[in-house]
Image (tube, grey):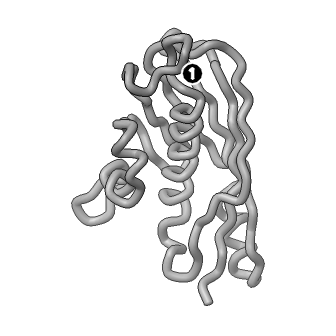
Amino acid sequence: MTVGNASMGEMLATAVPMVRTLNLEFAEVTAERAVLRLPDQPDYHNHLGGPHAGAMFTLAESASGAIVLTAFGDQLSRAVPLAVRAEIDYKKLAMGAVTATATLGRPAAEVIADLDEGKRPEFPVAIALQREDGAVTGEMTVVWTLRPNG
């Protein structure tokens, strides 16, 4: 998504300081999928030498936010996207760079239809965390809502 001359990555890095702090890289952001990468950075390692769980959580949550803003950016004049809750499962040891791939759990049109009916829709975003060798090291679900303005 591009708004004016700013890409989604640039917008999130400006609006969300933690994105800048972790040096998150935006590989792909569409309304169907967002792919972000956490580079291997010793300052954010855990006691095993891999990325800290908090850094991976932030990576995954940021990927979910990127897809939500892209899919529902045209609704921002009437609703604000908010994360409601999140659950993460760490499955394998992550070492090196980690990539988060987020996908919407409900079609955007359904969510917008709920908003049109005056509802406050909730919808899940699923995120897979992967090492560079492709192994899935974690899975996260963030439930988002579009809170109507006013």
Residue type at numbered disc 1: Gln
138 sits left or right of 11 in the view: right
89 sits left or right of 104 in the view: right
Q: Is residue 39 visible?
A: yes
Image location (x, y in percent) of residue 67: 53, 51
Q: Residues within 10 Å of mark 1 (few under 14, many from 20)?
A: many
The correct choice, above or below, for 20 with respect to 134 in the image is below
47 sits left or right of 96 in the view: right
The correct choice, above or below, for 108 with respect to 62 in the image is below
- The one of 150 and 119 positioned closer to us in this rendering: 150
Image location (x, y in percent) of residue 122: 75, 63
Q: Is residue 124 visible?
A: no
Which quadrant would residue 115 be assigned to in this image? bottom right
Q: Which residue is at the far front?
A: 47
Q: Quadrant of the C terminus?
A: bottom right
- Badge 1 is on which residue? 130
Residue at 38% from the left image edge and 60% from the top image edge: 15
- The one of 42 and 140 positioned closer to us in this rendering: 42
Image location (x, y in percent) of residue 40: 39, 20
Residue at 74% from the left image edge and 74% from the top image edge: 120
The correct choice, above or below, for 68 with respect to 54 in the image is below
Q: Which residue is at the far bottom?
A: 150
Image location (x, y in percent) of residue 149: 60, 84
Q: Secondary structure at mark 1?
A: strand
Residue at 59% from the left image edge and 29% from the top image edge: 53
Q: Quadrant of the N terminus?
A: bottom left
